[in-house]
Amino acid sequence: MTTAEQTGNAQPEAAEATHGVTLTDAAAAKAKALLEQEGRDDMHLRIAVQPGGCAGLKYQLFFDERTLDGDLFRDFGGIQVAVDRMSAPYVSDAVIDFVDSIEKQGFTIDNPNATGSCACGDSFH
């Protein structure tokens, strides 16, 4: 037994790299339902940040079957969320939710890293 194990401070040998995005239960349920409706169990939800929009950066949120070199993953109730390493700093601590109200329906992204956004709300900086 090692000293770390004896003192109760044992660390996993290789911690899996992950990202800081959170998927709410509502968003996970909706994503899972959409994939089941399509009969797909080979896809994950990807959030990425791309240059563009009137504020400089825009989000992309889509189902993807690809795994890119350096992807970071987290599981939320059976739905894997992927973030590429370049996008990860921009979306760290972001929360993806699903809203279904009389006024609005769809996935929303609440990102504390966004210092501002454009009037249409499609891009941020």
Image: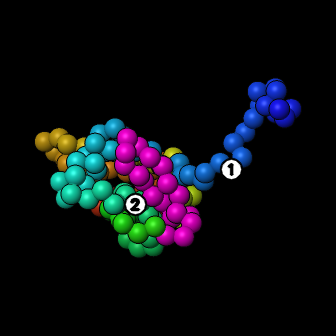
Dot 2 or dot 1: first in sequence order is 1
Looking at the picture, the colour scheme in use is: rainbow
SS for tag 1?
A: loop
Residue 25, image quadrant: top left
Dot 2, crowdedness within 10 Å: few (<14), some or many (≥20)?
Answer: many
Q: Quadrant of the N terminus?
A: top right
Say which residue label 2 marks: 46
Measured as percent of width and height from the top left, residue 31 is found at 28, 50
Q: Residue at x 22, y 52 (%)?
A: 36
Span colored in magenta: 68-85
Measured as percent of width and height from the top left, residue 6 is found at 82, 27
Nearer the observer, 16 or 100 = 16
Report the side of 37 relative to 66 (left or right).
left
Which one is closest to the eye, mark 2 or mark 1?
A: 1
Q: Residue at x 52, y 63 (%)?
A: 71
Measured as percent of width and height from the top left, residue 124 is found at 43, 61
Nearer the observer, 57 or 9 = 9
Q: Amino acid at mark 2?
A: Arg
In the image, is residue 119 part of the stretch drawn in magenta? no
Looking at the image, residue 90 lies above or below residue 55? above
Q: Residue at x 61, y 51 (%)?
A: 16
The answer to whether residue 33 is visible is yes
Q: Residue at x 37, y 45 (%)?
A: 78
Residue 27, label in figure? none
Q: Amino acid at mark 1?
A: Ala
Say which residue label 1 marks: 14
